[in-house]
């Protein structure tokens, strides 16, 4: 009986950590209920990230679904021009998932970084067929490129 209880406890802990994603550096939750922050090390990476390699990364990983320039039409994914500052799921004439449309957050350094780390965790039910970017360095250079895709590129986070 005792052994069974211990086993049950073990399984419960396993399920819990799988569900919450414990073990990730950042604490977790969908963006509809969780407000992520940037750690100082990541802000530092943003400062040294290179725009050109960020663009190369975008062209390799994102451009099959997202254009790198302004367009009022969309590819498989919505046009990302001016995505910084945009309320999620609101580009005109794009057919978003309910999950994205109802997530309620706005795209900032924090929310974009969090989403692009693990898209499913950030917006469960999202329709974007892209899992996420593990390496902080890759996400940092990509974000630097995304910020340049804007009429008024935002300043770096403080
Ligand atoms: C296989 C196609 C595909 C790839 C690859 C892809 N995306 Fe997406 N993306 C989508 C789709 C589809 C959506 C809309 C998701 C929804 O409605 O749930 C989306 C949504 C987004 C959004 C939210 C935009 C908004 O208007 O709210 C961002 C930001 C984004 N993608 C960034 C990226 C970046 C950066 C990359 C490359 C690392 C990338 N995506 C790769 C298809 C893709």
Image: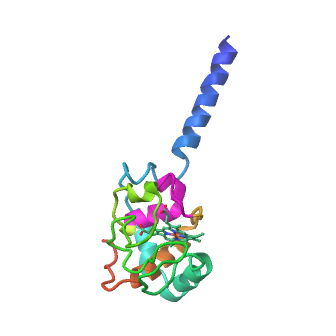
Q: Residue at x 38, y 72 (%)?
A: 91
User: Which stretch is magenta?
Assistant: 110-128
Q: Residue 9 lies in magenta, yes or no?
A: no
Q: Let me know if residue 25 appears in the view.
A: no
Q: Quadrant of residue 64?
A: bottom right
Comparing 119 with 43, the one in front is: 119
How far from the left and from the top, in percent, is residue 41? Answer: 44, 67
How far from the left and from the top, in percent, is residue 145? Answer: 46, 82
Q: Let me know if residue 140 appears in the view.
A: yes
Comparing 122 with 103, the one in front is: 103
Task: Using residue 105 as the reference point, say whether residue 25 is left or right of it.
Answer: right
What predominant SS class does the magenta segment belong to? helix
How far from the left and from the top, in percent, is residue 13? Answer: 58, 32
Quarter of the picture holding the N terminus? top right
Quarter of the picture holding the C terminus? bottom left
Q: Residue 123 lies in magenta, yes or no?
A: yes
Task: Using residue 52 as the reference point, say whether residue 47 is left or right of it.
Answer: left
Comparing 66 with 136, the one in front is: 66
Image coloring type: rainbow
Q: Is residue 66 above or below residue 27?
A: below
Q: Residue at x 54, y 64 (%)?
A: 128
Q: Residue at x 43, y 66 (%)?
A: 112
């Amino acid at each position: 009986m005792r052994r069974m209880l211990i086993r049950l406890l073990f399984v419960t802990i396993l399920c819990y950590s799988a569900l919450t994603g414990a073990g990730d550096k950042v604490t977790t939750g969908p963006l509809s209920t969780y407000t992520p922050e940037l750690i100082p090390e990541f802000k530092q990476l943003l400062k040294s990230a290179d725009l050109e390699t960020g663009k190369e990364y975008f062209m390799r990983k994102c451009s099959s679904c997202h254009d790198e320039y302004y367009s009022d039409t969309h590819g498989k994914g919505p046009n990302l021009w001016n995505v910084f500052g945009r309320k999620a799921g609101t580009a005109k004439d794009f057919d978003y998932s309910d999950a994205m449309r109802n997530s309620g957050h706005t795209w900032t350094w924090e929310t974009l970084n969090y989403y692009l780390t693990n898209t499913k965790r950030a917006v469960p039910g999202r329709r974007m067929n892209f899992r996420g970017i593990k390496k902080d360095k890759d996400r940092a250079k990509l974000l630097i490129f995304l910020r340049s895709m804007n009429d008024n590129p935002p300043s770096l986070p403080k």
